[in-house]
Amino acid sequence: MKFSASSSAWGAIAAALLAVFSVHAFSQTPRIDKEVPGNAVTAKGGLEQFTRVLIRELNSIGFEVTRGYPHLWTMEDCDLTFAVTLNCYANNPASPYVLAAVQPWPEEFVDPATTNVYGKTRPGYSSTYRLDPREAIVIFGRMPPPGKYMGLQSYVFSHEWVVPEGDSVHRSGYPWITDALQGGRDRFKDSNMVHYLFSTLARHEGRVQSFSSVSNSINNVVMDGDDAGASFGEIRYFVVTPDQAMDSGVRSALQRLGVSKDHVFTEQIARHFVRPGEPPGGKLGPLGLDRHAPDFLTGLRYAMPDSQQAANAWRSRLPLTVLRVRESPFSPRPAQPFFEIAADVRDAVDEGFLSDDLDALVNAVRDRAVGGPWNLAVLEAPTMGQAPIMGNVEVWLGHFGPYCRDIGENCLGDGQDASYFFMPPQPLDSGQVYAVIGTLGIRTGNATYNGLSINDASRLKGVGNVPDRSSRSSDSVLDGSASSYRGAVANHDQFFVHFFTRDCDTISGLADGACTSITHKMVPPAIDVTAPGHPHLHGFFTAGLRSYVMPGTARGPTTTYTRDPETGALRYQRGQLPPVVLAFKPRVQ
């Protein structure tokens, strides 16, 4: 049922609730026979009043409740994050994240090393939390206004790890399990990226950063069901829990207050999160509140709004409530864990038929750059394996939450809602020019939206984004950027071409406006010894191509590869064609 009641209707219900409270002096939990209006948050005090009623309902069935709050993690907050983690996790620069800040339970270990790790929080609150086996994080409120994407997902932030004594890989400064360098996970071994993929938490030699997924995300496609777009701007409820009884108890409380079960979504934190047809990764846990237990974070991401003004207004208010709910620690009830949850199957429109066109476009871009008045020479391009391509993070690095936890790898916030192609760090300060060339998912049927990100390699920080389309004519966009090559390439509208360099004016005419200048503010020059970040990566950038949510599915597209039995090299089989990177440098006069 789609909520449509007016604010006045909610006001009447709120008044009735207050009357009940005054008569019974809070000695009984009120019952509401009608559905709570979906736009209740528009009424003065509506969301707050409902929150109080819900807390009293949860208390009445023996649950302890504390209140948290939502807060933004923005690009600017990378300064605080990097101080703790030496990593900004290639944050998506297209939009900030909304994180749940919670209060710790009285007996919960609070790690001082994680203070303000995802932006400054109020005293007594934290963006990361350990998880009682019988608790739930409950988040509800008005969803953001219409856009291309929103989704909620939880992650393991860090967990204990025993570094084997005498491990030669560990001693050499590389990952602490030799097997981590096998099976394609060594692709970035010599690209200055390994310290982002394998790292301990500040001041904890035996605790590794993980940022690894624990379940399928709950995105707008999941929330909408058969009614696309129905959840934007409406009230929705989320229960994040490892315990079946907590899930049932919270859901029952919501339904007794008139909330439709179709508007409540549970993120099950199961012992095993597995891909269909594959053996499970390591068991999650053991859960608990002590210093040895893994800690978690939960966030909501909202991107590509229809109206930036409306999106900014929503973010400035964040009309969401965060509750932390648990069974009384004195209750004898044993936990009822979720044993296993399967990752949703992912698919893709096969782009293999565009392979020859991609080759032709790459050749056309190379020929124009070298043969024109820009005096450019071809450089050796960044490679993944033997080809000058961007690597699929999921395939080439094995980024899937349980598998990262198996080997102590940092999954960098992996998820199932997008494919992510990534370029190893490349230098900028000697006049280099880079062209990224690839298929455009919104045209091939593999994406609801695309974004090409620019990242400061010295902090792995997202500093800019090239969207697929824009409402502003002045913006550089991906859609249509290959049109000037129409004479040389069939199906040119299925592709994009975008250039990166320090100053796009130096290649004016070559890029036809499809160029991003990477300023010193975005990526500090190599000679800047005072800039934050890893000094050896100053002056280096990376690019990442995201394709979010394949139309007709709830998940991002995928790509399958085969492995050469003799060389071990990965070869494209079907799905998205990997983008190609060309590198140029001014000729020596």
Image (spheres, rainbow, N blue to C red):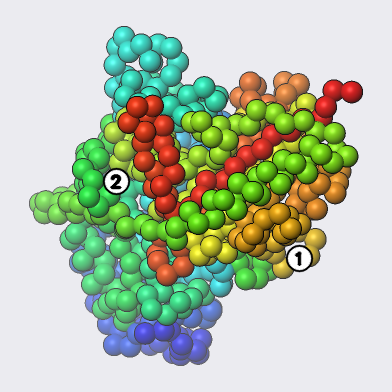
Q: Which residue is mark 1?
A: 472
Which badge, 2 or 1, is on the more N-terminal residue?
2
Question: Vertical placement of 161 versus 238: above or below?
Answer: above
Residue sitting nearer the eye, 94 or 22 = 94
On the image, which quarter does residue 50 sit in? bottom left
Circle 1 Cα neighbour tier, 10 Å, few/some/many (<14 / 14–19 / ≥20)? few
| 325 sits left or right of 437 in the view | left
Q: Nearer the viewer, mark 2 or mark 1?
A: 1
Residue 528 x %, y %: 75, 23
Mark 2 and mark 1 residues within 8 Å of each other at the beta carbon: no
Residue 240 x %, y %: 32, 57
Residue 398: assigned label:
none
- Camera sees residue 21: yes
Q: Identify the residue at horizontal 45%, vertical 58% (top origin).
A: 350
Label 2 vs label 1: CA separation? 45 Å
Q: Secondary structure at mark 1?
A: loop
Residue 478 x %, y %: 67, 57
Q: Secondary structure at mark 2?
A: loop
Residue 131: assigned label:
2
State the quadrant of the N terminus: bottom left
Residue 411 x %, y %: 42, 39
On the image, which quarter does residue 198 sit in? top left
On the image, which quarter does residue 95 sit in? bottom right
